[in-house]
Image: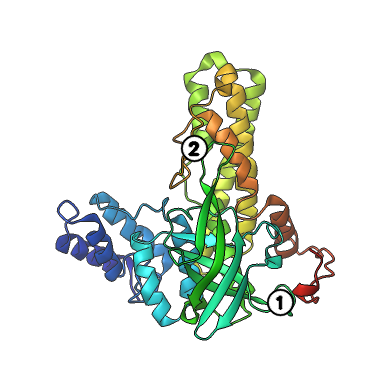
Amino acid sequence: MTDAEELRVRTGELLDEHPPATTDRTDFLRARFDAGLAWVHYPVGLGGLDAPRALQTVVDAELAAAGAPDNDPRKIGIGLGMAAPTVLAHGTDEVRRRFLRPLWVGEEVWCQLFSEPGAGSDLAALATRAVRDGEDWVVDGQKVWTSSAHTARWAILIARTDPDAPKHRGITYFVCDMTAPGVEVRPLRQITGEAEFNEVFLTGVRIPDAHRLGEVGDGWRVAQTTLMNERVSIGGARIPREGGMIGKVATTWRERPELRTHELHRRLLDHWVDAEVARLAGERLRQQLVAGRPGPEGSAMKLAFARLNQAISGLEVELLGDEGLLYGEWEMRRPELVDFTGRDAGYRYLRSKGNSIEGGTSEVLLNIVAERVLGLPPEPRNDKDVAWKDLAR
C-alpha cells in the first residue's frame, strides 16, 4: 500500500529528475503522469499508483511548494471531471492508454456532446443517430450548449443506435473526433456577449467501433458515470472560506462603507452562511469521492451552487447601486474558460443565470434529489417502456 511518505519520496525524485525551473512545462506534466503522480488513485500506468485518493493532496502540496506547473484544470475541466472517469470506468485498455495521458497533460481538450435542441432536460429522448457500417458508426444529428467545442480535440458523445428500443435502452456512448469530416461547430452568443457555448452539427461523421465506451445500447448507464462526476465537478469544487463569489461581495462591503444598508447587511449575512454551508457540504462530498462513492448528492450540491450564485450576484448588483448597472464590455469573444471572479459584477450577474441550466437543469436535479436522496415516490412516467420511435415529438 502506497503511503504518504512514499509519495513524498516519489515526488522528490520527480522534482530532482525534472526541475520545474529548467524543464519544459509539457515535459514536466508528462513525466508527472508517467510517475503515477497525476491521479494517484488511478491504476499504475494510467497516471496513478492505485493509492488512496486522499493522498493526492500530499503530492499536490509538495509540487506547489516546489513551484511546479499544474495542468491548468480550469481549461480542461470537462476532460478531467467528466471524460476521464468515464474512460477509466468503461473504456478498453487501449482506449485508456490512448486518451488519459494527453487529456491530463492538457494536450487534448475535451467537450461533451449530450444536450440536443429537442432533448435538453429529457436527455434520454435524444435523436442523434448512430448507424453501424462495418467497423465504424456513422453519426448524424445536432448537439447544443456545448462548452469548449471550438477548442476541443475530442468529445464524449451519446447517440441513438436502436430506435425500436425504449429511449433509455437504445443509446450508445462514443468518443468522437472533433476534427473528423462532417463535424461543424457554430458559436452560440450568450447574454454576456460571448460565445462560450456552441451548437455542433454532425453529418455523416464516422466513429470507429474501437472508440465506443461500454456495450451497444448501454450508453445511458455509461452516461450516468459522466453525469454524476459532472455535477460533483460543478457544484463540489474546493474553495477556501469566503472564496468564490461571496468573497467578491464581502470585499466590496468592507471597502465601500458608503454602500451599506441594514437590509443589504442582513442579506449578505444570510448568503455568507449559505456559502459556508455549501463549502462544508462540498468537503463531505469530496470525502465520499475519496471513498469511491460519487452519488446523487452531487446533484444537490450543483443545485445549491446555482441558487447561491444567482442570489449572490443579484445582491452584488444591488449593493453597487448605479455602478451595478454598468457592463465592462459586450464584444463577441469565444473564451476558453468561465471566469466568474476575474470579471465585473454585471458579468457575474448575467453569467450566473446559466448555472441553473448547465450540467442539468435545477428542475431535473430537484427530481433526482427527491427520488434518489430523499427516497420520495418517483413521478409517473408512461414512456419508459415505449419504443423511442413511437414517442410523440
Q: Which residue is mark 1?
A: 163
Query: Colour scheme used in the picture?
Result: rainbow
Count of numbered circles on the image: 2
- Of helix, strand and loop, which one carries label 1? loop
The quadrant where residue 220 appears = bottom right
Q: Is residue 192 above or below residue 289?
A: above
- Whether residue 254 is visible, yes or no, is yes
The tag earlier along the polypeptide, 2 or 1, is: 1
**Residue at screen point 50% across, 74% down:** 206
Image coords of residue 283 (percent x, y) = 52, 53
- Of helix, strand and loop, which one carries label 2? loop
- The N terminus: image quadrant: bottom left
Q: Is residue 147 above or below residue 206?
A: above
Q: Which residue is mark 2?
A: 332
Residue type, mark 2 in image: Met
- The C terminus: image quadrant: bottom right
CA–CA distance in space, label 2 to label 1: 39 Å
**Residue at screen point 70% across, 57% down:** 121
**Residue at screen point 15% across, 64% down:** 17
The quadrant where residue 226 appears = bottom right
Q: Is residue 250 left or right of residue 109?
A: right
- Whether residue 283 is visible, yes or no, is no
Q: Is residue 113 left or right of residue 121?
A: left
Callout 2–callout 1 Cβ contact below 8 Å = no
Count residues near mark 2 (Cα–Cα under 10 Å), then give few for <14, some for 14-19, many for 20+. some
Image coords of residue 49 (percent x, y) = 34, 73
Count residues near mark 1 (Cα–Cα under 10 Å), then give few for <14, some for 14-19, many for 20+. some
Residue type, mark 1 in image: Pro
